[in-house]
């Protein structure tokens, strides 16, 4: 048998990094979107938190990492800038959606690159595009972020039983609002089944609850207008 002539190189571990800078030690991964039934790439834990918020938002239809590039003037030449994401959202008008270019950066990174980011925003505006920047001040507000994680844990197909979801729908049709504890008192669904079905319907955009309060059995849930 042939003998090994050298030892293979060790693959560097892909460790998470605390911030969101585009550096080699930043965590690279894939975020599963149940709305698209596909994966969206992310770099940095802050980007992961943004994707969690966007995926749980009822107006967001899709998230893509393939945003159209932007040409901006750096003072001596034109430079190509690639927004991190492009998000398609409902506008509230029938059959009319809007695409928004998104960048996700730490507040310190925004401060360091403020001139560039302002010029990128100006170029986007000149062509009718909308460019938004999300920092930790928007992405990591609690308990909103935790509530969005709760929603995503119960979103998608084959998570909640469809019969349980239909029962919650019927309650939402006849009541102005309800709580999971109130549903359990009726005796048809257990707490776990009512909890899962309710959050599943929130993820589908049929129900809503205030994200400023941590979701539990006493949270007031309402049917979303137009759902």
Image: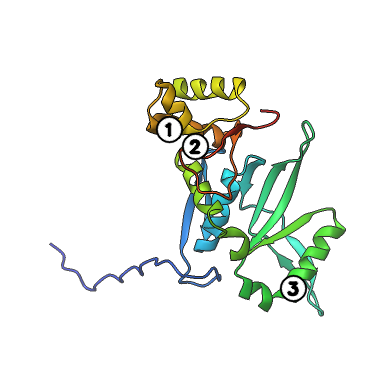
**Quadrant hosting residue 106:** bottom right
Q: Nearer the viewer, residue 34 or 144?
A: 144
Residue name at image x 59 percent, y 59 percent: 139
Q: Pick the quarter of the image with the C terminus.
A: top right
- Position in image of residue 177 (x %, y %): 59, 30
What is the crowding at mark 1: few (fewer than 14 residues within 10 Å), some, or many (at least 20)?
A: few
From mark 2 to mark 1, how far is it between C-alphas? 7 Å
Quarter of the figure that contains the N terminus: bottom left
Rendered location of residue 220, percent (x, y): 56, 37
The answer to which image quadrant residue 11 occupies is bottom left
What is the secondary structure assignment of the residue under circle 1? loop
Viewer-side residue, 219 vs 94: 219
Mark 3 to mark 1 CA distance (whole Å): 44 Å
Identify residue for label 1: 159
Binning the other alpha carbons within 10 Å of mark 2 as few (below 14), some (14 to 19) or many (20 upward) gives many
Q: How many marks?
A: 3
Label 3, secondary structure: give it: helix
Q: Earlier in the sequence, mark 3 or mark 2?
A: 3
Q: Mark 2–mark 1 contact, CB under 8 Å?
A: yes
Pinpoint residue 74: horizontal percent, then vertical percent.
78, 76
* Left/right of residue 134 with respect to residue 23 in the rendered view: right
Residue behind mark 3: 116
Q: Earlier in the sequence, mark 3 or mark 1?
A: 3
Q: Which residue is mark 2?
A: 155
Residue 124's place in the image compared with 62, above or below, is: below
């Amino acid at each position: 048998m042939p003998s090994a002539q050298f030892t293979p190189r060790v693959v560097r571990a892909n460790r998470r990094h605390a911030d969101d800078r585009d550096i080699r030690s930043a965590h690279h991964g894939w975020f599963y979107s149940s709305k698209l039934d596909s994966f969206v790439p992310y770099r940095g834990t802050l980007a992961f938190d943004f994707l969690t918020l966007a995926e749980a938002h009822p107006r967001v239809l899709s998230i893509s990492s393939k945003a159209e590039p932007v040409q901006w003037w750096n003072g001596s030449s034109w430079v190509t800038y690639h927004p991190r994401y492009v998000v398609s959202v409902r506008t509230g008008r029938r059959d009319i959606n809007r695409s928004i270019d998104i960048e996700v950066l730490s507040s310190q990174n925004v401060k360091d690159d403020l001139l560039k980011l302002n010029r990128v925003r100006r170029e986007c505006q000149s062509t009718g595009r909308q460019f938004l920047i999300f920092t930790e001040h928007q992405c990591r507000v609690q308990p909103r972020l935790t509530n969005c994680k709760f929603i995503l844990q119960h979103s998608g197909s084959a998570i909640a039983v469809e019969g349980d979801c239909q029962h919650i729908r019927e309650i939402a049709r006849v009541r102005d609002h309800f709580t999971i504890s109130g549903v359990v008192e009726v005796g048809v669904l257990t707490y776990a089944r009512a909890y899962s079905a309710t959050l599943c319907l929130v993820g589908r955009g049929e129900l809503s609850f205030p994200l400023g309060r941590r979701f539990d059995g006493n949270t007031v849930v309402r049917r979303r207008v137009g759902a």
